[in-house]
Image (cartoon, grey):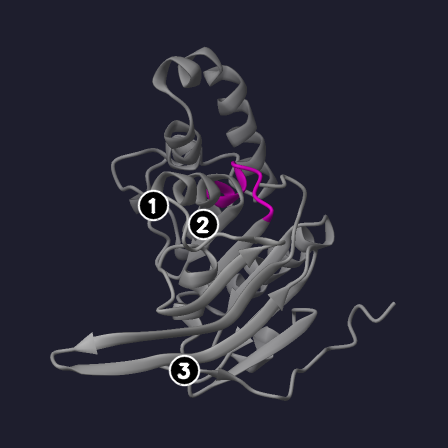
Amino acid sequence: MNEQPQPLHAVAVEKAYRKGEHAVDVLRGVNLTIHPGEFVSVVGQSGCGKSTLMHLLGLLDSPDIGEIRLGDDRIDHLPSRTRDRLRNRVFGFVFQFYHLLPELTLLENVLTPLMIRHSMPAYWKNRKVYRQRASDILDRVGLGHRLTHTPKELSGGEMQRAAIARALISEPQILLADEPTGNLDGEVEAEVIALLRELNAEGLTVVMVTHDDALAKAADRTVRLLRGRVEDRIETPLRRAA
């Protein structure tokens, strides 16, 4: 697998979920390409398949029909261990509900992807380097003074910035953010979006799911889902026309 940034493709993707004897179609032949360095927002009404598409792109789920490709390589059908490696190294994830481990400090939460990636001897050997990296990232997102605090001691905005720091520790190529401001008020929401834009300006590919059309305008490109399909109309803000 090429380690250089590659475009991410959903190719004719379909996904349905079963409710008893009935299948509920969620995605119906979605085609989408995310280019390296883009900031793309995916919008649509509740139930249109936004989060499902995000989960498929990040290999958290598999399509029933169609393919997920990274560059020229199909990745959705790879062995479980290989998909785990891609999730740990290529993708970073930020969710609406943070998913921080309550018993760990903020610094330890950010370090968990590296703990998962490396064997215990390898992690322990490089622990000082990793702790410094985590500390630097937390300082960058404005949480350098919170290293030893647990999630219950943080505000919602602080927990979301901590979740972004955890996603960044593995130096991913693509950040997948699913309603990253869904639990935040307006001022804190703006801070998180500004951070995502800053990271994108430095070269990180960002895909953000949101139901808020106003927030979607922070992105370079907006993709709208309607009844499980990509609408023909794709909005392209002029913010980065140059």
Q: Earlier in the sequence, mark 2 or mark 3?
A: 3
Residue at image position (42%, 40%) is: 82
Q: Give residue 29's position: percent from left, percent from top.
A: 47, 79
- Secondary structure beneath dot 1 equals loop
Q: Which mark is residue 48?
A: 3
Residue type, label 3: Cys
Residue at image position (51%, 43%) is: 165
* Foreground disc of the pair 2, 3: 3
**Considering the image in quadrants, where does the N terminus appear?**
top right
Q: Give residue 196's position: percent from left, percent from top.
A: 61, 56
**Mark 2 neighbour class, 10 Å CA radius: few under 14, some 14 to 19, many 20 or more:** some
Q: Which residue is mark 2?
A: 158
Q: Give residue 109's position: percent from left, percent from top.
A: 38, 36
Residue at image position (53%, 69%) is: 11
In three-dimensional space, the C-alpha distance between marks 2 and 3, rounded to whole angstroms, equals 29 Å
- Secondary structure beneath dot 2 equals helix
Foreground residue among 155 and 180: 180
* Foreground disc of the pair 3, 1: 3
Q: Which residue is mark 1?
A: 100
Q: Which residues are magenta?
A: 165-173
